[in-house]
Amino acid sequence: MSTPPGRWRGARLSTTTTGSPEQILRIREKATIETLEKLRIVQEILREKKAEDVEVIEVGTRTLIADYFVIASGTSNTHIRAIADGLVIDGKHRGLKKDRVEGYKEARWVLVDYGDIVVHIFAPEERAYYDIESLWRETAIKLGSS
């Protein structure tokens, strides 16, 4: 399968918005509201599935990967899969569309990617080992001081 010109495989399509500055601002505001509504739904599902130590980190000003990382823990592999299933199945019923899910089989660190929101569901040991919260906090500090 060949990649169309101007794109690389796996990249999200990016469109150029044209119009007056006011129109562009309204489009961006709408996108932000949609992102915040998606974030609310994700947090609600995590509460319903009894995810532990949920933390939301705004990363949109520091990376193109996503606008928010949501980090949560499960108590066992079964609990981690149940949280991921809730995000995918219940999320779909509430209008969320996932891009992909990674790590489901092992259920030690499951990633559910919604494009602008990436949810990380960790086993407690993996969360402590990788400590991605500290990594992103440190990034914010370094960017703020430069």
Image: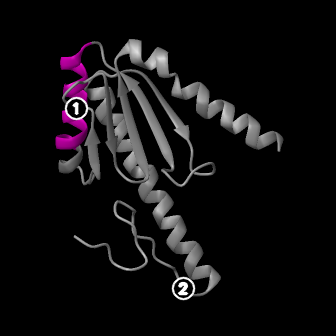
Left or right side of 139 for 1:
left
Q: Is residue 136 left or right of residue 92?
A: right
Q: Position of residue 26 (x, y in %)?
A: 54, 73
Query: Can you tell which quarter of the image residue 126 is in?
Result: top left
Residue at which label 1 appears: 104
Q: Residue at x 68, y 31 (%)?
A: 138
Q: How many marks do you count on the picture?
A: 2
Mark 1 lies on a secondary structure that is loop
Q: Are marks 2 and 1 in contact (CB under 8 Å)?
A: no
- 22 lies above or below 10: below
Quarter of the image with the N terminus in it = bottom left
Front residue of 70 and 94: 70
Extent of the magenta region: 76-90
* Marking on residue 21: none
Q: Main secondary structure of the magenta part?
A: helix
Amino acid at the residue labelled 2: Thr
Q: Nearer the viewer, residue 18 or 49?
A: 18
Examine the image and state in which quarter residue 81 appears: top left
Q: Is residue 145 left or right of residue 99?
A: right
User: Residue at position x 35%, y 28% from top?
Assistant: 121
23 lies left or right of 116:
right
Q: Residue at x 57, y 44 (%)?
A: 59
Q: Amino acid at mark 1?
A: Tyr
- Residue 118 shown in magenta: no
**Which residue is label 2 attached to?**
18
Residue at the outermost front position: 2
Task: List x then y, in percent, for residue 11.
Answer: 39, 62
Q: Nearer the viewer, residue 102 or 5?
A: 5
Up the image or down, 107 lies above or below 43; here it is above
Q: Is 94 situated above or below 44?
A: below
Q: Is residue 77 above or below residue 1?
A: above
Q: Residues within 10 Å of mark 2 (few under 14, many from 20)?
A: few
